[in-house]
Amino acid sequence: MVFSSLTFICVFLPTVLLAYLLIPNMKIKNVLLIIASLVFYAFGEPVYVLLILVSSLINYFFGRLIARNYQQKELSVDASYALNAKVAVTLAVVINLAFLGAFKYAGMFVQTADSVFGLSWNVPVVALPIGISFYTFQAICYIVDTYRREVVATKNFLKMLLYISFFPQLIAGPIIKYHDVDKQLDKRAVSVSDIAIGMRRVTVGLGKKVLIANTMAGVADSVFSSPLTEVNIAVAWIGALAYLMQIYFDFSGYSDMAIGLARMFGFTYRENFNYPYISSSIQEFWRRWHISLSTWFKEYLYFPLGGNRKGRARAGLNKIVVFFFCGLWHGASWTFVIWGLFHGLFLLLEEYLPIKKLPRAFGVIYTLLVVTVGFVLFRADTIGQATYIIVQMFTGFHFEAASVSLALQQLTPLFIFTSIVAIFACLPLKARVVQVIEKHSKGQAFLRVINASSFIVSIALLLLCLLSLSGGGYNPFIYFRF
């Protein structure tokens, strides 16, 4: 089940929310959310519900083991207890990564070994459990933070299970740290305001996904599935820019919906996107793009590798390692790895080139160019296809009838209008407008009127999304690789 489906919006969410509000006891509320989350996941992945249960049980066990070793160390001078905790956290991380590797990367590595060494091995065909990358990273957060003593390992398995399986972030993130929701798992309140604000945020995310991302997806898919001989400079740029918009509005739309859904059930999640397309460097881009993931890699891989504490050369190597695995995390394909290394390379270049000294407008253009080219690698099915399209973006000055026809087919009024809306939606116009209004003598009263009006607008937006979904419009799910 996905958020952008009529089943979820019209049946699942209202049913679960109503039942949640009618239940007075917090423990029973949590049980309801666990059952609802497992049903949500089982709707498309019934077998892999067992995998979530096993993962939760394993990490609960290791969390308790680490905590018990620390407690015993405090009561004893025997240093072996600290060693036991280190062994436990290492083993827990290895097991989590082994699950991820077995289900997500086994086929990729066997196929690579077969092509390089001619081993003629059979490539294992394993259906990828949706969202496994997200909930595995959450589990590692919990284990490592328990070892670092930044969180207290829970004694309640149901809390652990709810943390791992809670449906708003289960299949598309964001990656939530346990200490951010620990207290909320035990005690939280939901007001009418929370539900209204949460639903407004869900509607905004749904609009991003259904009205903008899906429109962009149709064009991007058309270009990337076309014969390469029909791709010229115009077609290549149309496809690249369409995907640039698709992935942002799809990904940030799902994050908006996750944040809004969590708010409706009393949870507060941090922001996951902060207008990344206004960044003036790749470094700034990664501070604004998929914040929970970039934070995870910084805190759980970059810093343990040494960060920038061991010299400039070692810091550069650490960044390359981080972006290798960042690319690999996104999908079991070498195109994702090259995409990650591509970003890592530009991060290194920014250490030596005066990018930050450029006027901000030039920095934004440079960053958008790098990000757009990078997303061609991300979207392409093969390295060869990605290379060809990137070359055509800068040298494809040939205009055969087939290429011109393909380009014109994409430039529909709907696509052009949606592109204009998308460009404005990429800008932090809301914050600027609020700043201007607040300077006015009657600004606060005006803001209250705008805030009240936004709920009416969100209802209209929701109806528009429902009409689009009921009409059977194109509604791809891009997280099957994650």
Image (spheres, rainbow, N blue to C red):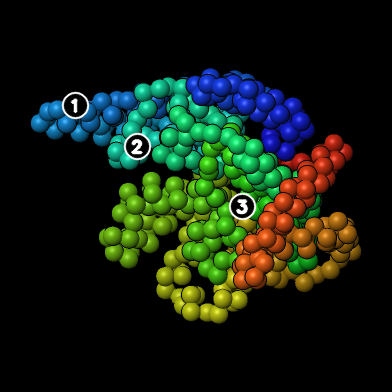
Does the image show residue 156?
yes
| Circle 3 residue | 378
Give the class, few, some or many, for how many residues have Cα within 10 Å of label 1's Cα (few <14, many ≥20): some
| Circle 1 residue | 72
Q: Nearer the viewer, residue 462 or 78?
A: 462
Is tag 3's residue or tag 1's residue first in the polypeptide sequence? 1
Whole-percent x, y for residue 245 in the image: 70, 56
Determine the residue positioned at 47% across, 34% down: 184
Q: Which of the labelled discs sits on residue 465, or is there none?
A: none
Q: Nearer the viewer, residue 25 or 74?
A: 25
Q: In front: mark 2 or mark 3?
A: 2
Whole-percent x, y for residue 418 in the image: 80, 57
Whole-percent x, y for residue 259 in the image: 59, 43
Q: Against 444, is 52 above or below? A: above
Q: Nearer the viewer, residue 16 or 364?
A: 16
Q: Is residue 445 left or right of residue 63?
A: right
Q: Measure how far apart labels 3 and 1 are at the Cα level.
A: 48 Å
Q: Amino acid at mark 3?
A: Phe
Q: Are marks 2 and 1 in contact (CB under 8 Å)?
A: no
Element type where label 3 sits in the image: helix
Q: Is residue 183 left or right of residue 407?
A: left
Find residue 374 and report its image quarter: bottom right
Find residue 189 and report its image quarter: top right
Q: Amino acid at mark 2?
A: Val
Does the image show residue 53?
no
Is tag 2's residue or tag 3's residue first in the polypeptide sequence? 2
Determine the residue positioned at 42% across, 70% down: 351
Q: Measure how far apart labels 2 and 1 are at the Cα level.
A: 17 Å
Q: Nearer the viewer, residue 461 or 218?
A: 461
Determine the residue positioned at 57% across, 57% down: 274
